[in-house]
Amino acid sequence: MIQDPVLRVDRLGKAFKSYSHELGRVLSWFSARYGQYEEKWILRDISFAIEPGQSLAIIGQNGAGKSTLLKMITGTLRASEGQVHLKGQIAAILELGMGFNPDLTGRQNVFQAGGLLGHSHHALEGKMDEIEAFAEIGSYFDQPMRVYSSGMQMRVAFALATAFRPDILIVDEALSVGDAYFQQKCFDRVERFREAGTAFILVSHDRAAILNLCERAILLDRGRIAKDGAPDEIMDYYNAMIGTQSDGDISTELVRGRVATRSGTYEATVEAIALHDAEGHPIEVASVGSQMQIRATIAVHAPVQRLVFGYAIKNRMGQTLFGINTHYTDQELENLSAGDRVDVTVSFPLNIAAGDYSITTSLSEKENHVSKNYEWCDLAATFSVVNTARQVFDGLAFIPPTIEVTHRPADQA
């Protein structure tokens, strides 16, 4: 059922004026005819909508305009063009410690910052015990914030921002400073809010957080929306963009109903790839705990000074279960010529849960694909895992244990 959006952004844009001298800026306050300036557009023609309970990730490189967009959505920055339509209450953590006074205690800052968010003193008093308990900073809650670590500030900020369930919750990178325990605590609260109808917007470079929390993603590039789609598709495309900043191409194709991204300069490419069992038979389905082989043939199309082969196993959500390359195994190759072929065989046990998986391959000059990406290919191969012979277990990894159970009767206890 389609619901009316709680947030709609229509052709939003922001330009900043750069004056040739300060006098021109002052004169422009009195009349637009005065003052020579140049306009620099940070964002242009941004349009999207989000419904109640939906979760959206906004990603992009530094300078793409993410923070500027969020400031216009929350009303702390005026747009140069376009409109933002909000329905309901919005809560946002855009900058760590935003609105906090370092000389006030955590408790005092809750009253001060909470008041700026529109909450009454009485309402904040009623929520204070809950905020203090959620933040879990102990006696520091009544000490000046100048002695807080960044993680402690984030705990108080998130506890305050989510003390009252908003219609829209926006988090901009703040969770990255928290420890794993508190991050999970925040994720659990976000999920509960979403189930109750809160729309959630996350700005982050954390692939795992985006894939776990968001059902949609928008990629900003040079102030415009480059792509809008499923999080795994957008993150793969973003990864390809990073690898082709200086040179290279990006292309996409459908593989079994999913969008696969391929990028690189293509001096070397994976010419063929196949999956085999321990006996060497080609397979598409394997059993939990069985042996699998990746057999790849690399074709060299131009002189390559150094070649590193890497692969990653991803689940159907696009989360990486395991990845490694020949730089880390000290097996990189050097001084290859056009026309050379390289055969690679990777063997490993499938100690993973039943499900659908894919293989991503990478050919690069160094240990990562950022400096020189010959080829990066998502969904280079796909396979399924079934549990036919192992005990039932829960989770993503198959880690067979040895369990000892000793029964001691009451008269021997």
Image (cartoon, rainbow, N blue to C red):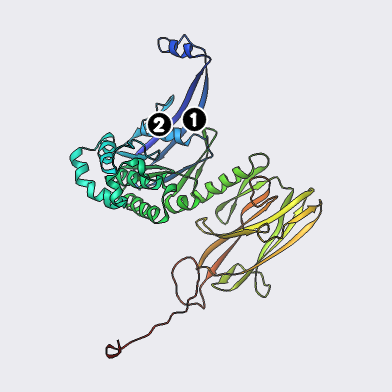
Few, some or many C-alpha atoms within 10 Å of disc 2 (few <14, some 14-19, many ≥20)?
Answer: some
State the residue position of label 1: 43
Residue at point 68%, 72% (across, down)? 280
Could you tell me residue 119's position as x and y percent? 24, 38
347 horizontally vs 183: left or right: right
Identify the residue under disc 2. Answer: 72
Above or below, 324 against 240 in this view is below
Whether 22 is drawn above or below 10: the answer is above
Q: Which residue is drawn at 53% across and 48% down?
A: 235
> Where the C terminus falls, by quadrant?
bottom left
Tag 1, which secondary structure? strand
Asked if residue 409 shows in the view, the reply is: yes
Amino acid type for the residue under numbered disc 1:
Leu
Q: In this view, does 55 lie to the left or right of 378?
A: left
Whole-percent x, y for residue 35 in the image: 49, 11
Please name the amino acid that badge 2 sits on: Met
Check contact, mark 1 vs mark 2: CB within 8 A: yes
Q: In the drawing, does residue 345 fall left or right of residue 351?
A: right
**Relative to 300, residue 174 above or below:** above
Q: Residue 86, percent across and down?
A: 33, 35
Please say whether residue 5 is visible from this viewpoint: no
Question: In front here: 137 or 92?
Answer: 137
Q: Which residue is drawn at 22% across and 46% down?
A: 127
N-terminal-most mark, 1 or 2: 1
